Image (spheres, rainbow, N blue to C red):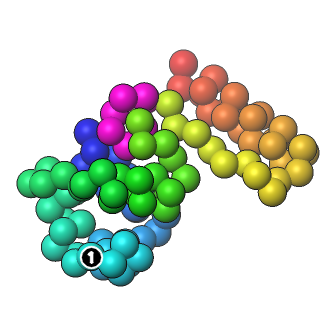
Amino acid sequence: MVADRMRYLREANNLTQAGLAKHLGITRSSVNAWELGISVPSTQYIVELARTFNVSADYLLGVNSTATLDVSGLSEDDVRLLYQIVKHMRKSHE
């Protein structure tokens, strides 16, 4: 679960494994091992990954299937537009 979500979030944020590794101060092979499920990030790195990708640690760990979106700094109109987009996307997947 962590492996899949981590890879998805990294790719969605246009980060390479090397780029994420540099950001976290670890080796690319560590990130690769996490994404392949060979090893799992320590608690410290779960927290760092959650901060990096603006998601909860619960989401990364698969405890909660709902991702959150940080809308701080956006106007009310921007937030309203995001809700409309999400609503449209949910409707199109029904």
Q: In the image, what residue occupies the spot 81% across and 43% down?
A: 79
Does dot 1 land on a helix, a strand or a loop?
Answer: loop
- The foreground one among 50 and 20 is 50
The answer, for residue 42, to whether it is visible in the render is: yes
Question: Residue 8 in the image: x percent, y percent?
Answer: 37, 52
Name, please, the residue furthest toward the front. Answer: 44
Rendered position, 19 above or below 45: below
Part of the protein shown in magenta: 59-65
Q: Residues within 10 Å of mark 1 (few under 14, many from 20)?
A: few
Question: Quarter of the image containing the C terminus?
Answer: top right
Q: Say whether residue 64 is left or right of residue 75.
A: left
Q: In the image, what residue occupies the spot 42% across and 60% down?
A: 48
Q: Magenta stretch: residue 62 in it? A: yes
Q: Magenta stretch: residue 88 in it? A: no
Question: Quarter of the image containing the N terminus?
Answer: top left
Question: Residue 21 in the image: x percent, y percent?
Answer: 31, 75
Name, please, the residue furthest toward the left. Answer: 38
The answer, for residue 36, to whether it is visible in the render is: no
Q: Say whether residue 15 is left or right of residue 29.
A: right
Q: In the image, what residue occupies the spot 55% across and 53% down?
A: 54
Question: Residue 22 in the image: x percent, y percent?
Answer: 35, 80
Question: Residue 87 in the image: x percent, y percent?
Answer: 69, 28
Q: Say whether residue 2 is left or right of residue 56.
A: left
Rendered position, 60 above or below 14: above
User: What amino acid type should be assigned to the residue bearing mark 1?
Assistant: Ile
Q: What residue is disc 1 on? A: 26
